[in-house]
Image: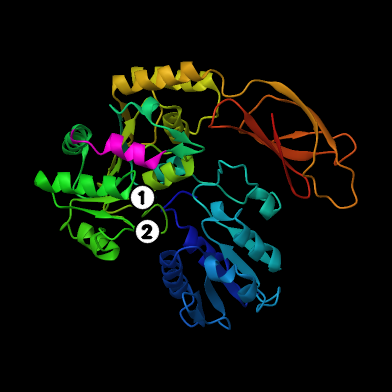
Amino acid sequence: MATGLGKTWLSAFDSNRPEYRRILFVAHREEILAQAMRSFRRIRPNAHMGHYGGGIREGDADILFASIQTLGRANHLGQFNPTAFDYIVVDEFHHAWAKSYRRVIRHFQPAFLLGMTATPERADGGDLLGLCQENLVYRQDIADGIRLGLLCPFHYFGVPDDVDYSNIPWRSTHFDEEALTKAVATQRRAQNALGQYRKHGGSRTLAFCVSQRHADFMAEYFRNNGLKSVAVHSGQSSAPRAVSLEHLRQRKIDVIFAVDMFNEGVDLPELDTVMMLRPTESPVIWIQQFGRGLRLSGNDKTLKVIDYIGNHRVFLIKPRTLFRLGSGREELLFLLKKLRSGNVELPPGCAVIYELEAIDILKELVQRAGPAIRSSTITRSSRRYTGRGQPSPKLSTTATRPGRYERITVPGGDSWIPWVIYPSRSGGRSRLHVNFSSIWKLRR
């Protein structure tokens, strides 16, 4: 369910049954645990609630809110009987492929396990549904939430970025931070961002930056131009996080420039503008940042999103994610054609406006990239298959639909198994993930 649609409330109501005597709520941020405890308290005012993490060990509580960083350690996990909890909630479930989460999920044997996330897709191919026996209970995205009146409408502005990303080194899965910061922390780009803000922005803005130096630079530039702005990050030059959020709510601050903050677990219903001042290699992070301002706050709120579009393939993630497209080239080209003509179907009250130069940049990227993945036959024996006492199966199939779950036959092995192909972001090669008793990774 998209951010703001009430995942925590759903888990609180669903677990409020006599057969679920003890409940475990797992998350990776203290803010999420604190908010969840407040929600559960509204539903179960007399329940014995406890916290497990940050030096607090209240493991005997009826409803336990646990930090994965603490509970995921073997010495802490071993103190709990596998059947200690009847109902387990894992929030931000897109993290659940990490070893600490899988260790917790394997340890416990609840009557029901609920995984909740606003961003179920994973770029590394982790089989999240496999952790839940392939059982997807419910899905509701941003467009559904807006149509139901549960999220506010948005006006999205795709603006061209004058940074030449072809000159910035690419390190495995991301840009080199130092070179990227040098390219974006310039007077020219800051002046452009200020102009876009004054043209499209509102009164409470959250801007996502490349690095601490970039955030500090942007905050100083906006202050020098008469705006109340601060930078919030993990460095020593950061403004206080909680105080900055409160000042933004009270309109004592116009803009917060953030780095790796506020992607998850923070409710900002008063927020009316989001600025994407950084390239985003992950669709998960991009949609999380987009969704920060979609919570309702009054009847007339419309979120403004100002997003930079540059000349690198990672920027194709943005329209694909916004319009839930696959990895094929033709549907993206068709979308760009409709965007140019203004003929795009959107939820009520929403608008997507790309400047013509930004559309031209995206079109050139699509044409330069070619098909995301070509149909190909993959035949190889697995050296990573760990099914005990079973022969290593051979796989022979034609991979034609990247990014979708399909089924194939494995000679000499399981008759039907789920698979998914993820196009690589590092140039041409794709990855095939096959779910046997463990995950089998092949590379073409």
Q: CA distance from mark 1 to mark 2?
A: 8 Å
The residue shown at (10%, 43%) is 225
Q: Tell me the kind of residue under disc 1.
A: Arg
Q: Secondary structure at mark 2?
A: loop
In this rendering, the answer to whether 337 lies above or below 308 is: above
Confirm whether the magenta stretch covers residue 184: yes
| Residue 350 picture location, percent across and down | 33, 35
Q: Nearer the viewer, residue 381 or 127?
A: 381
Where does label 1 land, which residue? 292
Residue 266, label in figure? 2
In this rendering, the answer to whether 175 lies above or below 208 is: above
| Residue 326 picture location, percent across and down | 55, 29
Which quarter of the image is occupied by the C terminus? top right
Residue 284, label in figure? none
> What is the magenta segment's predominant secondary structure?
helix
Q: Nearer the viewer, residue 58 or 216?
A: 216
- Asked if the residue under mark 2 is in contact with the one under mark 1, i.e. CB atoms within 8 Å, the reply is yes
| Residue 86 picture location, percent across and down | 66, 72
The answer to which image quadrant residue 18 occupies is: bottom right
